Image (cartoon, rainbow, N blue to C red):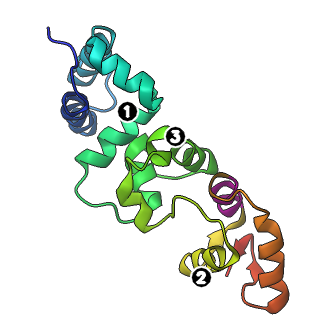
Amino acid sequence: MKSYNSLKQFVSDYKMYRAAKKIDSGREGETITSYLKKKIDRKLTLASRHFKAMLKKRGYTMNDLVLIATHDSIRNVYSLESFVRECFGLSYTSPLHYKKVLSSNAFKSGRLKRLYEFIPPRIETKEEFTRFIKGRRDIPKSELTVLMSQLCKKNWRIWLCELVDKGKIVEQGGRWH
């Protein structure tokens, strides 16, 4: 059995695993899904020094590898929510899942570049914050808190209070409109 020498090899194996998981998701015992998962784990432990050095240099964890593989293997990313659902195989999203994606080294390094259409890599000014809020109307408060705590280094809560005071956004039912 060969080991991983490049990220492209991992992406192709993980793409096959995701396809098998959709077909053969819920059974117990030795299935195609469990076989492919064991194969990926075995290849990761036997990975070449070059591959391991690349992972260490970039600070990638297994979570980062899964995010990169999902990002590279899906055709279209329609929204951050759809990407999170696809990555974690869920029918719902929670703030914890957003935090995993946004705090990953893969997102911070720019490797998940198709997500930048929906989420900027950083929000540093009040104008960027206002543009983001206007672009994502009807955003839950908990989601906004997680997103801004990962993207903003400055005090975004002051900017939010100013927008509320000016009447540009309104809180209604736990969401910002």
Residue 63 in the figure: left or right of residue 32 = right
**Could you classify mark 1 by the number of other residues whose Cα lies within 10 Å: few (under 14), some (14-19), or many (20 or more)?**
some
Q: Which residue is mark 2?
A: 134
Q: Give the numbered dot on residue 163.
A: none
Three-letter amino acid code of the residue under disc 3: Ser
- Residue found at the very far left of the displayed protein: 1
Q: Give the numbered dot on residue 65.
A: 1
**Height in image: 130 above or below 67?**
below
Q: Find numbered disc 2 in the image and state the secondary structure of the residue it sits on.
A: helix
Query: Image quadrant of residue 69?
Result: top left
Query: Image quadrant of residue 141?
Result: bottom right
Q: Find numbered disc 1 in the image and state the secondary structure of the residue it sits on.
A: helix
Q: Position of residue 72 (x, y in %)?
A: 26, 46
Cα distance between the residues tagged 1 and 2: 32 Å
Q: Find numbered disc 3 in the image and state the secondary structure of the residue it sits on.
A: loop
Q: Which residue is mark 3?
A: 104
Near-viewer residue (155 or 42): 155
Cα distance between the residues tagged 3 and 2: 26 Å
Residues in magenta, as a range: 142-149
Residue 89: in sight, yes or no? no
Three-letter amino acid code of the residue under disc 1: Leu
